[in-house]
Image: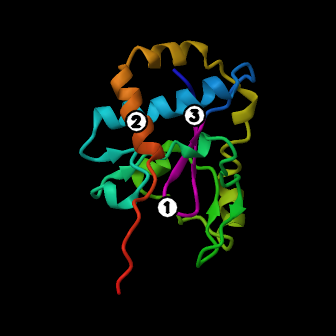
């Protein structure tokens, strides 16, 4: 029931942003975001994972809820990323992503002026529509078992194994 915004990161995948009304604190926001990731993985475990370690993903797409963790960073809207071609982490519509006209590095410093002139700021009104997290969080809690939560937390916080260096 929440209305999210979408933004390619300018690096690998999209960020989904949900404007909140300010009533929820970290102790609600982090479990909500992490739980949404767990539900997505539970629904499609052959394609999605919360495994942070690349070697443990087995070709699946990482649902990275770590951007909601304490002191985590997030590419700001319209930030130029330090990558070849100067991709920009700029908001887009769900339709653009679904039709494939926008990808993780499609929007660049060279193309942004034209894009803004053509479509404007698709997030112009996003933050004016803060939403409550209370009911969605309760609904989410009913969708996951304690085992789901535990497995999800373990996958998202797993540390890399020590690797032997070649002699």
**Label 2: element kind:** helix
Residue drawn at (29%, 58%), measured in percent from left and top? Answer: 59
Which one is closest to the eye, mark 2 or mark 3?
Answer: 2
Any mark on residue 12, and which?
Answer: 1
Where does the image place residue 92, in percent across and percent down from the top left? 58, 49
Residue drawn at (50%, 58%), measured in percent from left and top? Answer: 102
Q: Which quadrant is the C terminus positioned in?
A: bottom left
Side of 30 where 161 appears, left or right: left
Above or below for 2 versus 65 = above
Where does the image place residue 132, in percent across and percent down from the top left? 65, 18
Between 153 and 94, the residue placed more toward the observer is 153
Any mark on residue 4, and which?
Answer: 3
Residue drawn at (59%, 64%), measured in percent from left and top? Answer: 107
Residue 148 can be seen, yes or no = yes
**Label 1: element kind:** loop
Where does the image place residue 53, in percent across and percent down from the top left? 41, 56
Side of 154 where 114 appears, left or right: right
Chain-order first, disc 1 or disc 2: 1
Between 54 and 157, the residue placed more toward the observer is 157
Q: Which residues are magenta?
A: 5-17
The extreme left residue here reads 46
Answer whether labels 2 and 3 touch (C-beta < 8 Å).
Answer: no
Answer whether labels 1 and 2 touch (C-beta < 8 Å).
Answer: no
Give yes or no for residue 100 being in the magenta stretch: no
Chain-order first, disc 3 or disc 1: 3
Count neighbours of disc 3 (C-alpha within 10 A) and say few if under 14, some if 14 to 19, many if 20 or more. some
Residue 144 can be seen, yes or no = no
Secondary structure mostly seen in magenta is strand
Any mark on residue 152, and which?
Answer: 2
Between 5 and 112, the residue placed more toward the observer is 5
Give yes or no for residue 9 being in the magenta stretch: yes
Q: CA distance from mark 3 to mark 1?
A: 19 Å
């Amino acid at each position: 029931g929440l209305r999210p915004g979408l933004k390619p990161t300018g690096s690998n995948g999209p960020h989904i942003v949900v404007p909140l009304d300010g009533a929820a604190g970290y102790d609600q926001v982090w479990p909500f975001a992490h739980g949404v990731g767990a539900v997505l993985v539970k629904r499609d475990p052959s394609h999605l994972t919360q495994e942070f370690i690349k070697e443990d993903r087995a070709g699946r797409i990482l649902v990275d809820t770590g951007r909601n963790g304490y002191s985590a960073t997030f590419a700001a809207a319209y930030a130029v990323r330090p990558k070849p071609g100067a991709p920009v982490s700029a908001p887009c519509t769900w339709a653009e992503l679904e039709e494939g006209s926008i990808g993780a590095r499609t929007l660049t410093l060279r193309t942004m002026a034209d894009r803004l002139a053509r479509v404007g700021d698709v997030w112009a009104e996003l933050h004016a529509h803060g939403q409550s997290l209370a009911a969605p969080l309760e609904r989410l809690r009913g969708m996951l078992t304690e085992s789901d939560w535990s497995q999800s937390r373990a996958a998202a916080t797993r540390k890399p194994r020590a690797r032997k260096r070649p002699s």
